[in-house]
Amino acid sequence: MAIEWILNSAMNRFQLNFKRNVGPTSESIRKCEPNTLVEWRDYYFTNVKSKDHIIELGKKLYIKITEVIQAEVEEITEEDCIDYMLKLVIDRTFDGYMTEIKTIYGQLESELGYKIEPAPDKVDKA
């Protein structure tokens, strides 16, 4: 599970799964209408991208993980982790709350012409 998460995160970060790299996969599989994995594989490698091209993308992914990401991970400090958790739990929660107030409550109050009050804690929890 951890390996797939790392591979997926890195692939997305470096856009190796973007259409420009792997071709129009969704469109291509619909055009192919395969009944088996073998049919799809043959179609893809013949009509979309070559197997060698995908192997090269895999090699790029390996380099990005072993050189770029590994170096970045080694730079992370305990203080970075503490700061991140504090910002995530406190700052971003507050920012989200304020955005909610401004967008949802603000729009409703404007539309209804009525001041909306938050529910009392006892009612909110019920």
Image: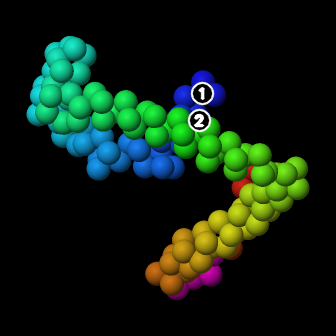
Measured as percent of width and height from the top left, residue 109 is found at: 55, 80
Give amino acid for label 1: Ile
Q: Is residue 85 visible?
A: no
Q: Nearer the viewer, residue 24 or 97?
A: 24
Q: Is residue 75 above or below residue 43?
A: below
Q: Quadrant of the N terminus?
A: top right
Instruction: Decide whether residue 113 is among the magenta residues.
Output: yes
Where 57 falls versus 108 (above or below)?
A: above
Residue at screen point 43% across, 33% down: 58
Q: Is residue 78 above or below residue 22?
A: below
Query: Is 7 part of what is drawn in magenta?
Result: no
Residue 121 image-quadrant placement: bottom right
| Mark linked to residue 3 | 1
Question: Are the residues flagged by discs 1 and 2 in contact, CB closer than 8 Å?
Answer: yes
Q: Residue at x 71, y 64 (%)?
A: 92
Residue 24: image quadrant is top left
Q: How is the image coloured?
A: rainbow
List the residue tagged with mark 2. 6
| Residue 93 image label | none
Question: Alpha-carbon neighbours of circle 2 within 10 Å: few (<14), some, or many (≥20)?
Answer: few
Q: Is residue 11 left or right of residue 70?
A: left
Residue 117 pos. (x, y %): 68, 73
Residue sitting at x 49%, y 38%: 61
Secondary element at image label 1:
helix
Q: In the rendered structure, which segment of residues is drawn in magenta?
A: 112-116
Compute the Cα span from label 1 to label 2: 5 Å
Mark 2: secondary structure: helix
Rendering quarter of residue 30: top left
Q: Main secondary structure of the magenta part?
A: loop
The amino acid sitting under disc 2 is: Ile
Residue 50 visible somewhere in the drawing:
yes
Q: Camera-side residue: 126 or 67?
A: 67
